[in-house]
Amino acid sequence: MPDLFLGLISGTSADGIDAAIVRFDDRADGGLDAQLRFGRTYPWDAALRARLVALGQQAAVLTLDDVGELDVQIADAFADAALAAITDAGLTPADIAAIGSHGQTLRHRPHGRDGDGRAPFTLQLGDGARIAERTGVATVADFRRRDVAAGGHGAPLLPALHAALLRAPGEDRAVLNLGGIANFTLLPGDGGAVRGFDTGPANGLMDAWCLRHTGEAFDRDGALARSGRVDAALLQRLQGEPWFALPPPKSSGRDQFHLDWVDAALRGHESVADVQATLLALSATTIADALRATQPATTRVIGCGGGVHNAALMQALAEALPGVTVESSAAHGLDPDHVEAMGFAWLARQTLLGRPGNLPSVTGASGPRVLGVVHPA
């Protein structure tokens, strides 16, 4: 069997499809080596991305035909990205053992639609069968639903990989993924249980606000946020969201933290730049508060995801966490733009090897589970 795996993910920001081709090797000491052979982000078709963003903001109603059509369109976009990555890496489909495809999250309701625990569900679109047909490569997809079926949140799913690659004895570390939503992996230096959870917004609200008011998909280097001032009253209203006070395990998504949620807190006199500065402050403060509440002895935060490139956000995090080193995963040999896609390559490998992909201490599931549905080549 080939030893290369291809991971695909488009996160809550829907800012592109990340593809990573990775070779993994199990070490004799139980650790893991991961070599990124190739990584690249492929753009969405503009019209499809606009539709996905609108759905994430709860700005549209879908029929069953819409859902079925989107499932195919997203799968085709993922298959195109996979084939492009294979070609751009100088490989052929026969060189890839399997594709691990996250898909695009349409809704994430691990507590049920009304939060009452009835009928919990998570829904990612991007038909794995179609990806396998289009690429000729075995495809593992639909990773989150098994964990939810086992009583978990289905997220986050990468803490086990973070632990294998970034844990350090004697140092309490936290891996911080800054996608549309922020999530932590907590790695205690004493060998204690790995934990992980979503903290709330990272880039998602800032990206959406920037797109609405400037036409740009994101706030490059935090320039718009830097041009404004934090509105303390607005920040306090946003921080009052009850979700922030929930204990882990917990997870969230764009379907909870969206512009309608922001609009409900506005009073109509705030400037565009001031709201952007406040949304950045919301991300930084809720992340810092969550870390202090769950692993207060943390000395190093290792960031990955698109938010690492937002200098204003990284500065705000460092200021909110005095005495803590806040750095990119690049300092540890891991490209911050491709850690998540590497994770879904790893999850595909775990599935094919019959190994669990979740950590119950993270998701709250009733036990370890082999995740995903395998669509053979």
Image: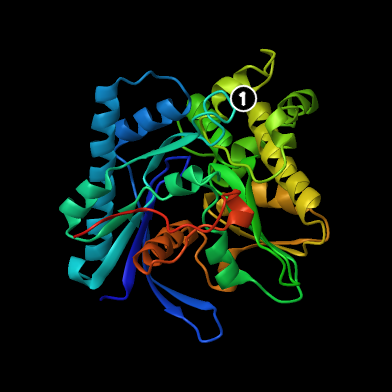
Give the residue pinned by disc 1.
Answer: 272
In terms of secondary structure, where does tag 1 sit? Answer: helix
The residue nearer to you, when weighing 272 against 55, is: 55
Instruction: Give how far across and how far down residue 154 sits, in percent.
Output: 51, 46
105 left or right of 327?
left
Asked if residue 346 is positioned above or below residue 205 in the image, the reply reads below
Asked if residue 209 is positioned above or below residue 294 in the image, the reply reads above
Instruction: Give how far across and how far down residue 220 sits, in percent.
Output: 54, 44
Q: Residue farthest to the bottom?
A: 28
Q: Residue at x 55, y 63 (%)?
A: 160
93 left or right of 212?
left
Q: Amino acid at mark 1?
A: Val
Question: Is residue 18 something one can see in this rendering?
Answer: no
290 left or right of 19?
right
Sort mark 1 into few (<14), some (14-19) or many (20+) by Cα contacts within 10 Å: some
Which picture quadrant has residue 247? top right
